[in-house]
Image: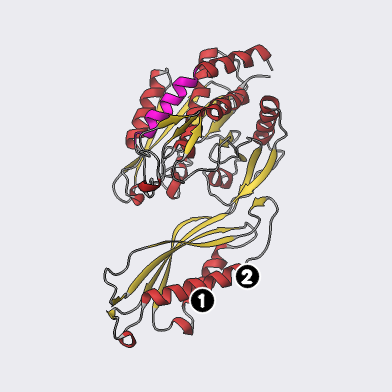
């Protein structure tokens, strides 16, 4: 490895620190929330990023898919270099909504810089890594460095609600080759020492209880969907945590989780017994277990005599069955581990997680994939932030992966 070349690369990225922070701030002001979460999608943000990349002299291929609402969901792909193998970095452009605005100390869509951090929705997930990846690409081009691998950046849509119009479709476009390597910078820890090698199965379920709406003073004439929903959720909570008890030390936490989350509004008046109640369950299931078995168990409980007065429908909202984990000895993990050890002076460690990333799709297609970045655990929270220092330092690691030995 040319030590001087590495120093030039690091110097270029240090000099880009303010520009990177400005790019992240401008991007955050352009909302990119899924229509399923009340947004307009990623089109405006993708336009901003495409224009930026083209201003740096890169050719950008755009892959646009229409979702069920008729909204365009764009994905961007850039390649630089003509090597036999490409390392693809795959950040996502979309974000979740801000949640309760009252919990934020500032406008979540107007980036606020303070004490080396940039606050705003999507700064951490996945804006920081997205900016790191494109500035690593820019530095590699400007430095004229000798490359061992071609550089591939795929900025994808729809990750936050299942990737149906993002990496799932992009995998079928023929832009990836069998010898390519993949890095998904969509999970990490503050030290930058953990490399994620595997993910649990992800399952989001919509549970609809159909009862009979009546006046609250005559409950015997109806079937209280709210009450039966509570009973059902309590029953399956006890059942699932009682049956699916295996532990796998790779993962944190090491067990499967089944958590009641969102609940939709039912009736407007206190004196009305609701005839319909809709709840959601978030399941993160160890690869040792079958997702089909979990769903079958829930449907069996729903059809039991305890719930004979109501009808309970169980619908899959998002499902991603666990892909084979990436081996510690795979090429991308070896390269990334070397980069972390050299630049961070720490020994990498390996982990599995419950969260789902685009790596599920690349791994399922047979591509060993590493998931890594340096971030604090503030994704999806009020006052989400990115550390400018981590954004710059991760860009150095990304760039280092491509340099010729």
Q: Quadrant of the N terminus?
A: top right
Q: What residue did someone put label 2 on?
A: 243
Give residue 19's quadrant in the image. Answer: top left
| Mark 2 in CB contact with mark 1 (< 8 angstroms) | no
The crowding category of the residue bearing disc 1, from other C-alpha atoms within 10 Å (few below 14, some 14 to 19, many at least 20), is few
Q: Nearer the viewer, residue 74 or 27?
A: 27
Residue 386 position, x and y percent, is 49, 34
Residue 223: horizontal and vertical position, in percent?
A: 35, 81
Q: Quick check: can you spot residue 390?
A: yes
Q: x, y (%) of residue 85? A: 59, 28
In the picture, the quarter occupied by the C terminus is top right
Vertical side of 337 occupied by 101: above or below: below
**Secondary structure under badge 2?**
helix
Q: Is residue 74 magenta?
A: no
Q: Residue at x 60, y 67 (%)?
A: 241
Q: Main secondary structure of the magenta part?
A: helix
Q: Which residue is mark 1?
A: 300
- Please state the extent of the stretch shown in magenta in the rendering: 16-30
Task: Write down the quadrant of residue 294 in the picture.
Answer: bottom right
How far separated are the C-alphas under marks 2 and 1?
Answer: 14 Å
Tag nearer the camera, 2 or 1: 2
Give the vertical position of 251 relative to 398 (above or below). Answer: below
Label 1 residue SS: helix
């Amino acid at each position: 490895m040319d030590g001087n070349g590495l120093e030039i690369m690091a110097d270029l990225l240090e000099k880009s620190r303010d520009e990177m922070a400005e790019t992240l701030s401008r991007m955050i002001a352009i909302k990119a929330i899924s229509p399923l979460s009340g947004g307009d999608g990623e089109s405006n943000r993708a336009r901003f990023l495409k224009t930026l990349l083209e201003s740096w002299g890169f050719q950008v291929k755009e892959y646009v898919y229409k979702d069920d609402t008729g909204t365009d969901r764009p994905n961007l792909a850039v390649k630089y270099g003509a090597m036999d193998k490409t390392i693809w970095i795959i950040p996502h452009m979309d974000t979740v909504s801000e949640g309760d605005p009252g919990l934020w100390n500032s406008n979540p869509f107007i980036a606020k810089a303070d004490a080396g951090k940039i606050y705003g929705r999507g700064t951490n997930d996945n804006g920081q890594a997205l900016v790191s990846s494109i500035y690593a690409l820019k530095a590699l081009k400007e430095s004229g460095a000798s490359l061992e691998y071609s550089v591939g950046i795929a900025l994808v849509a729809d990750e936050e609600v299942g990737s149906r119009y993002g990496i799932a479709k992009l995998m079928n476009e023929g832009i990836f080759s069998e010898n390519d390597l993949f890095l998904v910078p969509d999970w990490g820890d503050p030290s930058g020492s953990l490399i994620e090698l595997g993910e649990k199965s992800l399952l989001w379920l919509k549970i609809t209880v159909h009862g009979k709406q009546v006046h609250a003073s005559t409950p015997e004439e109806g079937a209280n969907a709210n009450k039966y929903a509570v009973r059902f959720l309590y029953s399956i909570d006890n059942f699932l945590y009682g049956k699916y008890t295996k532990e796998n030390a790779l993962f944190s936490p090491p067990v499967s989780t089944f958590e009641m989350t969102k609940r939709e509004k039912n009736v407007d008046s206190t004196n009305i017994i609701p005839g319909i109640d809709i709840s959601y369950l978030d399941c993160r299931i160890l690869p040792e277990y079958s997702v089909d078995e979990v769903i079958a168990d829930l449907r069996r409980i729903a059809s039991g005599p305890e719930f004979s007065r109501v009808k309970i429908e169980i619908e899959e909202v998002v499902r991603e069955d666990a892909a084979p984990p990436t081996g510690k000895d795979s090429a991308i993990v070896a390269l990334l581990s070397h980069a972390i050890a050299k630049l961070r002076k720490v020994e990498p460690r390996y982990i599995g997680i419950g969260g789902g990333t685009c790596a599920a799709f690349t791994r399922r297609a047979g591509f060993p994939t590493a998931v890594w970045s340096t971030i604090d655990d503030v994704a999806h929270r009020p006052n989400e932030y990115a550390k400018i220092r981590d954004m710059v330092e991760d860009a150095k690691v990304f760039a280092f992966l491509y340099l010729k030995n």
